[in-house]
Amino acid sequence: MKSTSLVSISDLTHEEILYLLKCAGYFEQHPNHKILDGRVVATLFFEPSTRTRLSFETAVNRLGGRVIGFSDAASTSTSKGETLKDTIKMVSNYVDLIIMRHHLEGAARYASEVTDIPIINAGDGANQHPSQTMLDLYSIYKTQGRLDNLDITLVGDLKYGRTVHSLLMAMPRFKPRFKFVACDELRMPAEYRDYCDKMGIEFSESTVFSPEVINNSDIIYMTRVQRERFTDFSEYEKVKNLYTLHNSMLDNSRPNLKILHPLPRVNEIDRDVDDNPKAYYFEQARNGLFARQAIICRALGIDPLSLHD
Ligand code: CP
């Protein structure tokens, strides 16, 4: 295997997605396989994160590698005016892999073009979050026993929510039926609707999170309204609480329904849903560790399954 970046979910072939899911399953059984001995990984987080950074760092630690990095760019020479290009070139002198989150769309792609070491995109603005998609797919597979022919409902901020953009772009070969539930201001952007049309992905749109939508879903994927992407705060105030899932709304839902959310949540899922067996968002976040172990190995050109066999 050769080392390679993961900037967009579309960097992965369908076969690579299936392979990574198999690796994630392996790491769930063997989370402490020490195959990164001697490797150093940088986590450069120019934007806040809890799950993504900590699960990537846990993944490296459990695989026997070492981590350097920062979670607050204000503590780095970025605050003195150092450019992203120079930062990436400097860090590339020290490590074997860079995992990066940045507020600018395209920042991870740019970083991958100015260094020879692999870059993993841990989220770039409203654009892409491919490692989240791999853990989402792993969660869907674990809970549904398959990835194909599912009714998947995406709810909330479909404009700025990078996780739904990545998820949608991973799905063409799995033939999903998507429902997009969002207000007009946060509607799924045209480029992603066009993508669905081009790839033959079935979708419908609604501004109403109705019982009919809920009761005909295998997966409901709730999202937070991305306050940090709004330039006009009064616009955020208008749309921030439009869609909230309450436990009583699940009374007639399908037995196999699972509720996903990339987290953090604010008001999109009432706390009374947490004890419902259909709530899966905390387990989903746990799955991030295994999916990210698989992604790190791919980035470094390591095949954990062949090492194991
Ligand atoms: N889902 C996700 O990206 O969470 P964090 O922002 O906490 O990393």
Image (tube, rainbow, N blue to C red):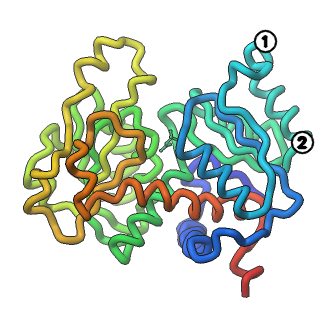
Q: Residue at x 58, y 77 (%)?
A: 29
Among numbered discs 2 and 1, the one appearing first in the sequence: 1
Amino acid at the residue labelled 2: Tyr
Viewer can see residue 151: no
Q: Secondary structure at mark 1?
A: helix
Q: Amino acid at mark 1?
A: Lys
Which residue is identified by label 2? 94
Q: Quadrant of the N terminus?
A: bottom right
Q: Which mark is residue 80?
A: 1
The answer to whether 57 appears left or right of 282 in the picture is right
Q: CA distance from mark 2 to mark 1?
A: 21 Å
> Residue at 85% across / 34% down in the picture?
89
56 lies above or below 241 = below
Mark 1 C-beta to ligand 1 under 8 Å? no
Most distant residue in the right direction: 93
Tell me how many marks there are: 2
